Image (cartoon, helix red, strand yellow):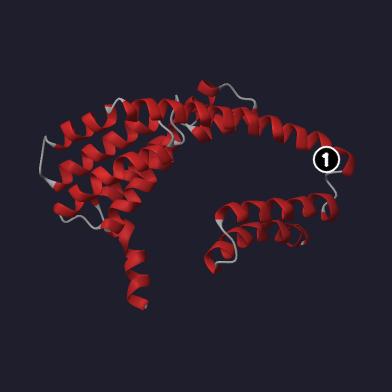
Amino acid sequence: MDSVLGALSAVFTPVIIIGGMVSGIFTPTEASVGATVYALILTVLIYREVKWKDLPRILWETLEASVRVLFIISAAGIFGWLLIHQRVPETVIKGLLALSGNPWIVLLIINFILLVLGCFMEGISVLLLTIPVFVPVITKLGIDPVHFGLIMTLNSMIGLLTPPVGMVLYTMSSIGRIPLWDLAHELRWHLIALMIVLGLITYVPGFATWLPNLLMGAR
């Protein structure tokens, strides 16, 4: 019971993040700052696991990790710009979409394109590049935009975990000081599970749309 009571204050952290965003109190970025401040208060004043004298070292290590990650993001952005400038993804997209007019085949092709692009480009760049091309196609084929938005989001999330330009993969490798390819190898089963979920969401729309439909129906 003591352990449960002791953990309640830490469990409250997701409540701050999700509750703050849902209620409109702050943006996702502001939520991360609020959660960080709350975690600092917990570790220093409540649990007393971190001493005040430890803060300069922790802040310096955080700065080092942030610089490494930002450098990787910058390099990925330059690489993404180069691909866009040379119209490589656009050419691939149009060529593959010309192969079929069947919605299920088109969704399979779109998933393939997004997964491949996610391996080499930063997620925002992929979304900015592909959404203007894909949305007219899925609208013409009668695919639910909410359903397609969830497919895009999940593909973008998977791309953050796939080498050689997975942002989250690099972040975890940098913070944990684990070789990149060792970490990628350990994540293989998680990626397989995510692929299964992607297949379910893609070809069983009810998995993705039942909650939005329920919320829209409740209005």
Indicate left or right for 138 with 82 as reference.
Answer: left
Indicate left or right for 166 with 10 as reference.
Answer: left
Tell me residue 101's x, y (percent): 10, 43
Residue 120 at least partly seen: no
Report the residue at 40% width, 37% height from top: 125
Q: Residue furthest bottom?
A: 219
Helix, strand or loop for disc 1: helix
Q: What is the count of numbered marks?
A: 1
Tell me residue 28's x, y (percent): 56, 54
Q: Quadrant of residue 14?
A: bottom right
Q: Residue furthest front?
A: 85
To which residue does mark 1 refer? 55
State the residue in front, 197 or 168: 168
Report the residue at 74% width, 32% height from top: 61
Q: Quadrant of the C terminus?
A: bottom left
Residue 39 at least partly seen: yes
Report the residue at 28% width, 34% height from top: 113
Tell me residue 167's x, y (percent): 50, 33
Q: Quadrant of residue 171?
A: top right
Report the residue at 41% width, 36% height from top: 159
Indicate left or right for 171 with 55 as reference.
Answer: left
State the residue in front, 204 or 64: 64
Three-letter residue code for mark 1: Leu
Q: Residues within 10 Å of mark 1 (few under 14, many from 20)?
A: few
Q: Quadrant of the N terminus?
A: bottom right
> In the rendered view, would you say 107 is above or below 70?
below
> In the rendered view, would you say 103 is above or below 207?
above
Tell me residue 198's x, y (percent): 33, 44
